[in-house]
Image (cartoon, grey):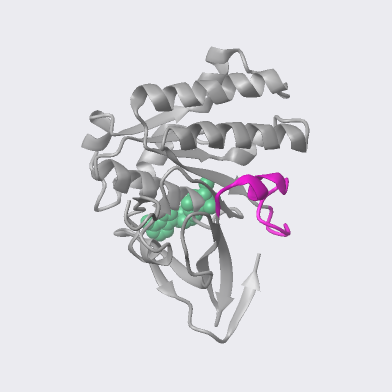
Amino acid sequence: MVDGSRERCKTGIAGMDSILDGGIPRGNTVLITGSCGTGKTTLSLEFLVHGAIMGERSMYISVTEVPEKLLENMIDYEFFDKKLIDEKKLIFVDLQEIYVKLGLEKLEFTLEDINILVEQIVKMVKELGVERLVIDSITSICYRLTSKEEIREFILHLGKELSELGCTTLLVSELLPSAAGYSQYGVEEAIADGIILLGNLERRGDLLRTLQVIKMRGTTHSRAKYVMDLTSIGILIAPLLKGGSVEVT
Ligand SMILES: Nc1ncnc2c1ncn2[C@@H]1O[C@H](COP(=O)(O)OP(=O)(O)O)[C@@H](O)[C@H]1O
Ligand SMILES: [Mg+2]
């Protein structure tokens, strides 16, 4: 800690760490939100891979895609090394398997079920010493919760426990293209320590991907909109030059 400022979790994504004045404050729970195809999974994976390279144990909990498929996306990256997985610096967990193990193969969760799930995630983080966690997506877990109160309880409980363990967490949130706000239920965005919004922008016939930090507790940050390019050397972030753009959701 320097001058009382919070220790940072460097994303390793160059432009992003400077937008965040050094990185995500450690222990924050951050919503990565945007509609389909905006790059949420790509950004989350890159955050974990850089963490693993820096020696931090990183865990990806996948709700909708099988880990093998995600691996295929990463193998193309120049900075990716399969050794990270063999050495268990980078760990993939399939949430469906956890549901089976916990007897949670049901369409609707009770408050007790939620607590069981949170405790299981916290247990894995604690036992394995996980410093970076991604849950992709939180929205698909929230589908099983029956009220906003349950969603609030789930995210609050999870965020609090993970923060106490010093684990920096990205919660991927799926937005419908036409949605207002930053999350499907409106609750997630109010509780999260940070919100990073990914979007699309049409400019002179090109469809650009954009990134904007809406909020981030524990640091000053730019709130400007940036262009985000997905490339084989990773995500590149550049300032968005004004003029000639149309927002598409
Ligand atoms: N390195 C890359 N270079 C170019 N395109 C990419 C790269 N990685 C992912 N993409 C493309 O970006 C799109 C969206 O990625 P993804 O992260 O899965 O979005 P989301 O999780 O928001 O739905 C996909 O169509 C994918 O083909
Ligand atoms: Mg995705």
Left or right: 172 in relation to 55: right
Residue 152 position within the rendered picture, expressed as x and y whole percent measured from the top left: 69, 37
Taking the view exactly as shown, the residue that stands out farthest to the bottom is 243
Q: Residue at x 38, y 49 (%)?
A: 47
Residue 165 position within the rendered picture, expressed as x and y whole percent measured from the top left: 43, 32
Please report the bounds of the magenta region as a residue range. 176-194
Q: Is residue 86 magenta?
A: no
Residue 46 position within the rendered picture, expressed as x and y whole percent measured from the top left: 37, 50
Name the main secondary structure of what is drawn in magenta: loop
Q: Residue at x 67, y 32 (%)?
A: 153
15 in relation to 177, above or below? below
Residue 36 position within the rendered picture, expressed as x and y whole percent measured from the top left: 59, 53
Taking the view exactly as shown, the residue that stands out farthest to the right is 147
Q: Residue at x 45, y 21 (%)?
A: 123
How many marks can you see?
A: 0
Q: Quadrant of residue 235?
A: bottom left
Q: Is residue 178 magenta?
A: yes
Can residue 15 be seen here? The reply is yes
Can residue 106 be seen here? The reply is no
* Pick the front one: 42 or 163: 163
Q: Quadrant of the C terminus?
A: bottom right
154 in relation to 238, above or below? above
* Pick the front one: 117 or 62: 117
Q: Quadrant of residue 96?
A: top right
Left or right: 221 in relation to 113: left
